Amino acid sequence: MKYVKWAVLLAVAVTLAVSNPSSQSYSVWLLQTVLHHSSSTLSSISTLFSGSLESAIRANTIRANYVLFSYYTTHILGHTFNVVGVFNHFFALSNS
């Protein structure tokens, strides 16, 4: 029974490590999130410059990679985004 617990724990840890999302995935996700929540006019303009906006997101993001998950802080467009990436998904903690 002891080995089963360790095997399950190891399987969960490996799954977390393998599914830790990349910085590029985060940039794409944040760009889509910003465009989705912006006004239609800003969204139309931003779509034209999405490549440069994605570059700006990458340049203004700090990633803390904890192997099992990542913590991202991005300062862009006058806002700060704090996000956790785990299991190939992103969860916004706070936006200001």
Image (tube, grey):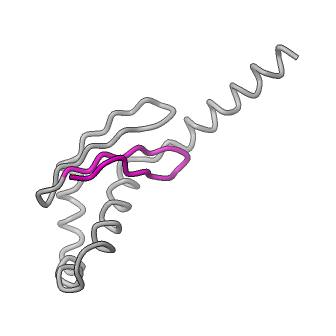
- In front of the other: 62 or 90: 90
- In x, y percent, where is residue 52? 18, 66
Q: Is residue 81 within the magenta segment? A: yes
The number of numbered discs placed on residues in the rendered structure image is 0
The quarter of the displayed image where residue 73 is located: top left
Most common SS among magenta residues: strand
Q: Residue at x 36, y 39 (%)?
A: 71
The quarter of the displayed image where residue 66 is located: top left
In the drawing, does residue 14 fall left or right of residue 91?
A: right
- In x, y percent, where is residue 62? 25, 40
**First to last magenta residue range:** 80-96
Residue ranking furthest to the top: 2
In the drawing, does residue 88 fall left or right of residue 38?
A: right
Residue ranking furthest to the left: 78
- In front of the other: 55 or 72: 72
Looking at the image, residue 67 lies above or below residue 20:
above
- In x, y percent, where is residue 41? 18, 85
In the drawing, does residue 92 fall left or right of residue 42?
A: right
Q: Quadrant of the N terminus?
A: top right
- In x, y percent, where is residue 39? 22, 80
The quarter of the displayed image where residue 5 is located: top right
Q: Residue at x 70, y 25 (%)?
A: 9
Q: Residue at x 23, y 69 (%)?
A: 51
Q: Is residue 26 within the magenta segment? A: no
